[in-house]
Structures are given as C-alpha cells and as structure tokens.
Amino acid sequence: MTDIIIKNLPILVVLCPLMMSLFVVLIPNTFISWVVTLFTTLITFIFSLLLYQEVYQYSSISYALGNWIPPLGIEYVIDKVSIIPIIIITLISFLTTFFASKIMPAEINNSSISKVYSLWLLAIAGLIGLVTTGDAFNLFVFLEISSLASVALVAMGAQKDKQALVAAYNYLILGAVGATFYVIGVGLLYGITGTLNLADLSSRITEINDNKALVAGFGFMIVGIMVKAAVFPLHIWLPRAYAYAPSAVSVLLAATATKASLYILARILFSVFDISDTLITLTLTYVILPLSIIAMFAGTIMAIYEKDIKRLLAHSSIAQIGYITLAFAIGTKASVAAGFIHMFNHALIKGALFMAITSMSFYLNKRITINTLSGLGRAMPITFSCFVICSLSLAGVPLTAGFISKLYIIKASISAEGVWIALLILASSALSVIYLWKMIEAMWFHEGPKDLVIKENPTVYIALLMITFLNIYFGLDASIVVNSSFEAADQLLGVQK
Amino acid sequence: MISSALGVWNYWVVFLLMMIGLFLVIGRQNFLKKIVGLTIFQTSVFLLYITFGKIKGGTPPILNNINETIYSNPLPHVLILTAIVVGVATTALGLSLVLRINSEYGSIEEEDISAQDLVDYHDQIETSKTVSIKFKK
C-alpha cells in the first residue's frame, strides 16, 4: 500500500486536491466542507513532504503519466528545483485553509461556501500541477486551470465590494492574453523542434543555432509567463485582484500564485534554454535585470502612497517579486539559489501580513485603510505582535526569515555584479520601512475609537501564530531552506553543457 | 522574396487575425468587445497550430498498404482540441463577469466603471477617516 503511494506520489500530489474539489462542491454543510478541504490540503502537504524525502534520495523523479513513455507521453518531473515551489504551495495552502475557517463565512454567503472551497482546491491543484508537469502544453492547461479558478475566487469578493468584479475581469483578460502568448511560444518551438517535453525540448534547442522562430517563440513564452508572475510592467492586474478578493483568497493567492509562475520563468530561462546562450544572457541583462530594479522601486513607492492596506501589501508584493527576478537575472548559482530562498521566505512573510490584516478586517467588519488601523495595535496585541514581526521580516531585520534572503541576494549580487546592485537593494529595503512604519505607527501610536474592544479568537490567530513562528524559525535556522535552494540552483544550472 | 512571403500566406492570415484580436483587447473600452477580441486572438493561435500540422496532400495518420502516403501530424490538432475547451471556459467566465458587472455598475464601458470605482475608493478612505476623527473627540 505505502509502496504504491510512494511510487505514485508525483501524480497524487496533483490529483488529491483536483479530485477532492469535485467532491467538496457536493457538501451542503459549510463546516464539513471546510473540514474536508483542510484534510485534503493536509494530505497534500504530507505527500509533498514525502516527495521531498524521495527527491533527496533519487535526485530526480520522473513519472510517466498513463505509462506512456516520455518524451512521447506526458511526463511529470519532480526534482530538487520543483520541490521548493511544491512545498511552498502545499504548506501555505494548508495554513491558509486552517485560517479560513472563521474568515470565509464572514465574507461569503453560506450557500456558496462549498463552491468556494471547491474552486480553492482547484486553484491549488492547478498551481501544483503547473510545477510538477514536464510537458510544455500540459503546463498551459494547468496555467489556465489555476488562473480560471483564481479569477472565479477573486470575483466571489463581489458579495462585499463590487470592485472585485472589475478586478476579476482584468485578471481574466490579462491572464488569458498571457497564457495565449505562452501557447504561441510553445507552438513556434514545437514547429521547430517537434517535441513538447521540456527536457527533450532543451536538448533539441541546443542543436539549433540562429533560428529566428526560436527567438520569437522564446520571447512569446517569456512574456506570457511574466504576465502570470506579475513582473513589473505586466503587473497591472495584481493589486486590484489581491485587494478585492475575499480576504482568505488574498492570503492564498498572494503567497502562492506568483511563486509557481516565477518557478516556470526560472525553468524556461535556465533549464529549457541554456544560460550560456547569448539570447538568455541578453534577456537577463537587458530585459529582466532593469525591469526588476524598476519593480523594486516602483512597487515600494506605490506602496508608500497607498492608503488601502490590502492594495499596499499587493504593491509591496510587486517589489518583492522584483527581488526574486533580480536574483534570477544575475544568473550565477548563488544568486539563483538566493532567488529560491526569497521565494520561500516571501511566501511566509506576505502570507502572514495578509493574514494579520484579514483578521483585523474580520473583527472590525470593514475594509482596512490607513485610518481604520488607529488603535488596533493595543486592541489586538497578538495579531499586532505577529504583524510587527513579519513587517520586520519583510524589511530584512536580522533574526527573521527576510534577513536571510536579503543577505543571500546581496552577497550573490556583490560577488557577481559589484556593489551597485547591492546598494539599490538596500535603498529599496530602506524605502519599504517607510510604508511598514506608516502602518505600525497608525496601529500603535494613533488613538483608536473609545469603544474599540476586540476579543481575539484563537481559531483566527493560531494559523497566524504558526506562520509567524516559521518566519522566526527560518530566520534563526535557515539551513534547510538555504541548502535545498543551493541544491536546486546546482541542479538547475549545473547540468548545463 | 515576395513569392516566398506569399507562399506562406496561411501564416499571414494567422498573424493578421492575431493582431486584430490583440488590438481589440487593448484598444476597446467596451468589456464585451474585449472578449470578442480575446476570442479572435485565441482562434488565431488555433489556426497557427493547425497550419503547421497540415501537409499538402497529407492524410490522417492511419497505416495502410500504400507505402508513399504522406501523413499530417495529428498532435497539433489534438492540442488545439484542448485549447478550444480552455478558450470556451475563458469566454464563458468572461461573459458571466460582464453580465454581473453590467448589473452592478449599469454599464460595461471602462470609462464609466473606472469613474465609479474612483469615487468608491475615495469614499472608503474618507468615510473611515471621519469615523476615526469622530471617535477621537
């Protein structure tokens, strides 16, 4: 029995949420549907931990779907690189589902809760599938599964605020254009190489030199994925979608959705194409590097001037995605590893910050703007402490997870490009303190309304405490994250010819 | 030069449709017309796949006794079947969102909607401000 499970882990980790999403929609009771969802995400998380163990034993697992031998059949590949986003997605989705128990019924009609959980699992399944698959076209299907499910989830926010509809619409249109760009790219590459398997594609691409269709295909693929990953000029859909989605959905999407796409970006740049290729070097230095630097500052500055807190955090996400793509753009082993470290830590940080803001809006029962924060720090000590710790982590203060990732990014950038990028990173981090302080100041030093008495509910703050604990834990002992990220970078870049 | 460019006229059709679709998505203010554009854009990609899956005189890939049969590649056609399903799902979701937007905002023109949104956004920030000032006194 356990043998069968171990053998089929790569598909189980996708199938478990996918199949359960069909089942959850049939459950009329809101509590039972939550329990089933929680149980599913827990099982998926356990599967992904088992996979982690397996990957470190065999270095890479290939799973032929339906026993059709790759490269002809669809292949699921789990290696040291893809296990990182899988762990991020499953861990965060478990914590977020746990967190959603009280939050979801407060924002969504009882009649549609089981449908929301169904979409929720579908989005998670899409994201995990996106990461596990080794087939370029299968990747597109999962891209669309996850994005259509997330669009529907964002639109559910319309029960609170009608702006969610427009946010969802923009997300849908831009997401569909991005996915179609990706398909055009895959089509052009398929036309040249005659294969859809990513590993096979990579070996056949090296045999082709100087083909214009190859360059065009690469461009289409990269731009399509950059839309999904919200890399700077293509991020327009992100702030609104995160701000007006139901709060629990914001937590899930902010922590996981862009991470899967960033992983795909890294995979296409370094694994499908060759880092030593001039095409990739030019793309990294003249497209992705400048865009990431602009993103770091544009995201932070937009966050400073933003008054709506969920939008503020979304803008800050754009800056943080800038750090990750910056690390990828430097293109050395150390910097790619730093990118993966930050990917993991940012999921923890942003998840926690969104959770804290969500709990506040849950008790106040209104949107959180910079003015409604007044006095909340004293009224909600537990949530406030978690918020402060995670803000420090975002700013990169020592002893928190954010410090580790900033440290590695700066170290890698100094050794590869010199001091100027490190200085830019530090400047952007310093700017981020402004918006974090703005929120903390309002919470702690501004006098709140007199009748503001809040009794914090353990079911709401336990998940927040757990994720904050992880923030501190990975700040004190980051060896697991750092080692797996370096192993991942080795596997991603090292096998290259 | 010209004859070789015209020889691949099917690709010209594909990229013409692609540009028309993309232009509609970017250039139109009407939410419904954007979806029309998106559908044209996606359809052009279907044609792109099918056009390089097809060979002149090619037959379906079924083994027969005649040796020199030319087969068309079936894989792009199958991929496009999947992509059509995805496209239909996207269009359906988009249209249902447009319906809801129309009933909530009373318009599907981007200008009207962003004007209403701007008012709402400022309202949210202003009202919360007045509340907190009232309590401070």
Image (tube, coloured by chain):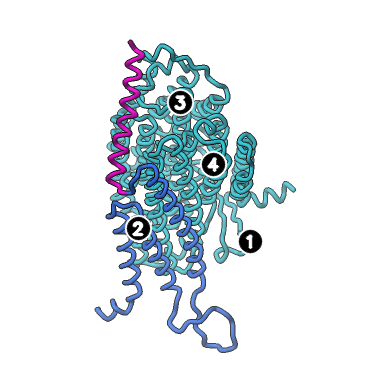
Quote the CA–CA distance across marks 2 and 3: 45 Å
Mark 2 or mark 1: name the one nearer the start of the chain: 1
Residue annotated with mark 1: A66
- The label shown at residue A116 is 4
SS type, badge 3:
loop
Figure colour of chain A: cyan
- Which type of secondary structure does the marked residue at label 4 adopt? helix
Give the total number of marks visible in the rendering.
4
Residue range corresponding to the magenta coloring: B109-137
Q: Distance between the residues labelled 4 and 2?
A: 36 Å
What amino acid does circle 4 point to? Val
Give the chain ID for the blue colour: B
The vertical placement of A5 against B21, above or below, is: above
- Pointers 4 and 2 within a single chain: yes
* Amino acid under disc 1: Gly
Disc 3 crowd rating (10 Å Cα; few below 14, some 14-19, many 20+) is few
Could you tell me if residue A7 is visible in this image?
yes
Which is in the foreground here, disc 2 or disc 3?
3
Check disc 2 and report its element: helix, strand or loop: helix
**As displayed, is residue A435 above or below residue A417?**
above
Question: First in sequence: mark 1 or mark 3?
Answer: 1
Quarter containing the C terminus of chain A? bottom left
Look at discs 1 and 4 and give the one toward the viewer: 4
Q: Tag 3, which chain? A: A
